């Protein structure tokens, strides 16, 4: 059996074809197929296009299962139904399974074992698996939460910038760093920059989170403040889920914000509950999708 694992997040859609031994034969990347960001017809085109790029590497006559972890495939039944309709068209005639993108990241990070995964990319969420059941914390979206995410960090950078310009905070190197990066000629050009150049686009705004690392490198105090707050938010989500475990539990992490490395992990680790062990991710989300598909396939075969 060959598998295509798909990681459909809010920024991009990643496709990987695996042989029966779990070796990746070919991969492809497409824009996001998130149903809340693109039209259903466009999501279908994106999914079909990625699969079509991989199929030439599928040996003739070999069976294929597609396993897709897609953002938005969660508790909202209307959105679930819409995603299922898109996948029905995009994945035909192959057998397929649909999961949430966070669940495949968790199963990849912990190689299918029970535990916790904190994700901090454009948004933020934590997910736990215990005895086959999933629990979540966070993931409320940028209007209601997403603390510790790239979007949240960028908004905090913008907020401190405006406060420093106003004199509500002492001015630090943040102002210079922001103006240089955004090409602002005057202090108040940030308003038009965000609304016109960025178009208030969530992903484009989130890209500014990379400035946090610049501030950390030059020891800007605002960098330390935001870093500590991000670490606190992420550790709170992990701890909220860890309280469901009575035995020692592994917690992993995934997403662009964790490119901050030990700067961020060093703020998270001391705040975790004593029975939580922070570990690096072991496998990719696409491999996590395959793990889930194999488990479901074997369960179905055993019931036949």
Image: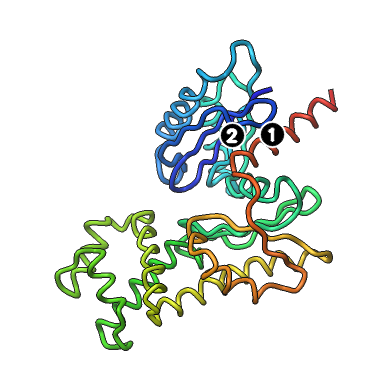
Q: Position of residue 117 (x, y in %)?
A: 64, 57
As rendered, which of 145 and 171 lies closer to the eye? 171
Q: Are marks 2 and 1 in contact (CB under 8 Å)?
A: yes
Binning the other alpha carbons within 10 Å of mark 2 as few (below 14), some (14 to 19) or many (20 upward) gives many
Residue at image position (50%, 38%) is 14
Left or right? Give the position of 181 relative to 79: left
> Which residue is painted at 73% across and 45% down in the image?
112
Identify the residue at horizontal 45%, vertical 56% (top origin): 122
Q: Is residue 114 left or right of residue 49?
A: right
Most foreground residue, 26 or 68: 26
| Quadrant holding the C terminus | top right
Within 10 Å of disc 1 (Cα), the crowding (few <14, some 14-19, many 20+) is: many
Q: Quadrant of residue 37?
A: top left
Tell me if 245 is positioned left or right of 162 in this view: right
Q: Which mark is residue 5?
A: 2
Q: Residue 166 versus residue 291: which sits nearer the camera?
A: 291
Q: Residue furthest left?
A: 185
Quadrant the N terminus occupies: top right
Report the residue at 25% width, 81% height from top: 165
Residue where numbered disc 1 is placed: 293
Q: Is residue 212 above or below residue 89?
A: below
**Mark 2 and mark 1: Cα distance apart in space:** 9 Å
Vertical order, 25 against 139 (above or below): above
Quick one: SS at disc 1?
helix
Indicate which disc, 2 or 1, sits on the residue closer to the N terminus: 2
């Amino acid at each position: 059996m060959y598998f295509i694992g798909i990681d459909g997040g809010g920024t991009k859609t990643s496709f990987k074809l695996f042989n029966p031994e779990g070796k990746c034969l070919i991969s492809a990347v497409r824009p996001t197929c998130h149903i809340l960001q693109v039209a259903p017809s466009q999501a279908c085109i994106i999914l079909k296009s990625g699969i079509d790029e991989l199929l030439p590497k599928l040996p003739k006559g070999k069976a294929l299962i597609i396993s897709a972890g897609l953002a938005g495939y969660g508790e909202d039944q209307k959105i679930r139904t819409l995603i299922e309709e898109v996948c029905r068209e995009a994945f035909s005639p192959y057998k397929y399974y649909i999961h949430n993108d966070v669940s495949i990241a968790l199963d990849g990070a912990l190689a299918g074992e029970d535990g916790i995964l904190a994700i901090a990319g454009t948004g933020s969420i934590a997910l736990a698996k215990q005895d086959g059941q999933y629990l979540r914390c966070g993931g409320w979206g940028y209007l209601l939460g997403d603390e510790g995410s790239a979007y949240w960090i960028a908004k905090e950078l913008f907020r401190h910038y405006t406060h420093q310009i106003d004199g509500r905070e002492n001015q630090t190197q943040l102002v210079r760093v922001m103006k240089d990066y955004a090409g602002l000629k005057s202090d108040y050009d940030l308003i038009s920059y965000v609304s016109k150049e960025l178009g208030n686009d969530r992903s484009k705004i989130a890209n500014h989170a990379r400035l946090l690392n610049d501030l950390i490198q030059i020891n800007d105090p605002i960098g330390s403040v935001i870093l500590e707050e991000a670490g606190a938010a992420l550790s709170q989500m992990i701890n909220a889920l860890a309280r469901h475990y009575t035995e020692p539990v592994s917690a992993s992490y995934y997403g662009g914000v964790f490119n901050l490395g030990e700067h961020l992990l060093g703020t998270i680790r001391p705040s975790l509950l004593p029975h939580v062990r922070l570990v690096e991710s072991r496998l990719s989300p696409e491999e996590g999708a395959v793990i889930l598909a194999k488990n479901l396939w074997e369960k179905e075969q055993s019931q036949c």
